[in-house]
Amino acid sequence: MSESAGNDPAPPAAVTAPSRPGRGIVYAVSAYFIWGFLPIYFIALAPTGPFEIVAWRVVFSLVFCAMAIVVTRAWRAFAAILRRPRIVLIMGAAGALIYVNWQTYVYATTSGQVVEASLGYFINPIVTVLLGVIVLREHLRITQWVAIGISVVAVVVLTVGYGRLPWIALLLAFSFGLYGLVKKQVGRNVDALSGLTLETAWLTPVAIVQLIVVGVTTGITFGHVSVLHAVGIVGVGVITAVPLLFFAAASRRLPLIVMGFIQYFTPILQLIVGVVLLHEAMSLERWIGFALVWVALVVLTIDMVLAVRRDRRAAAADATRSAAATEAAPTDPLPE
């Protein structure tokens, strides 16, 4: 998944008044499909290492976003955001978190650990719920606590299966969960294109330093392998920004609950890529751990569906009572 903003909550309007759901599903599936096959793209960039890939990803994402802002004439909205220092600083924090996510993810995919990376995005929704308790002091329902408990057991089982703590999965899940939490602070004030532009602008100095370090150690590969390889490096900017824009378009058209279901499309594809295409080992303990995570996700999803239905029934009941009160009230309280 982009990992960038793939976990951003859909705008509230998408829950109550979705429009063009067919087109929204196409956008959502396209975004998650691209994110699901990102491991193959990054592996195809060999012999480029993960640190060089991420550095170029930042640079060319910024270039692509700048061009997109010019082409779509979105500079006024972007300039308005720049005049709000608080939002700019928040986007800097978001950029730092997505950098950790990107670097961890690319390292995982280029070092033969795609399955563990997929695990990170499977447990991300559960981590998001846990962060709500820790950071936002939210009160969880019993079923949500059950899901978290099952996930803890799954991590223990996977630790036994891997012979170590699945740190890649946990780092991906927590960095992406915190990223979504930070982005929630700006809500709908920052669109997807402006957000990615600001994040990559903050990260560009880091990327430049990273390229310098790579250049004096292992050596820069960009421009020294082949024309096709160079085009692939440049393309990391496009393949980063495009699914993010698809996701934003889908969020405006689909209910939040639909987006919640479709988001599992990415880690399922990543798991298939890791096991079927890349032939990564899956021991019995790993299968049991993944199965426990899936059970936790089923519990969490059922809880979410029931909660949405309860909220809708409550909203409908409130609307009915309001309409009845309006009809009962005198329409003209003044005497004849």
Image (tube, helix red, strand yellow):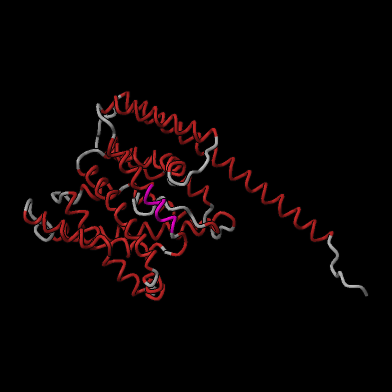
The dominant secondary structure in magenta is helix
For image coordinates 31% across by 66% down, the residue present is 65
Say which quarter of the image contains residue 114.
top left
The stretch drawn in magenta includes residue 181 = yes
- One can see residue 272 in this view: no
Q: Looking at the image, is 214 positioned above or below residue 122?
A: below
Residue 127 in picture, x, y percent from top left: 41, 40
Residue 330 in picture, x, y percent from top left: 86, 65
Nearer the observer, 17 or 144: 144
For image coordinates 7% across by 54% down, the residue present is 219
For image coordinates 84% across by 67% down, the residue present is 331
Residue 129 in picture, x, y percent from top left: 46, 41
Task: Say how many tags the image has.
Answer: 0
Side of 251 relative to 153 (left or right):
right
Q: Looking at the image, is 190 positioned above or below residue 270?
A: below
Nearer the observer, 176 or 225: 176
The stretch drawn in magenta includes residue 179 = yes
Residue 319 in picture, x, y percent from top left: 71, 55
> Which quadrant: the C terminus?
bottom right
Say which quarter of the image contains residue 52.
bottom left
For image coordinates 30% across by 70% down, the residue present is 66
Q: Looking at the image, is 246 positioned above or below residue 112?
A: below
Magenta extent: 178-185
Side of 112 relative to 250 (left or right):
left
Q: Looking at the image, is 318 positioned above or below residue 148?
A: below
Residue farthest toward the right in the current orientation of the protein: 336
- One can see residue 92 in this view: yes
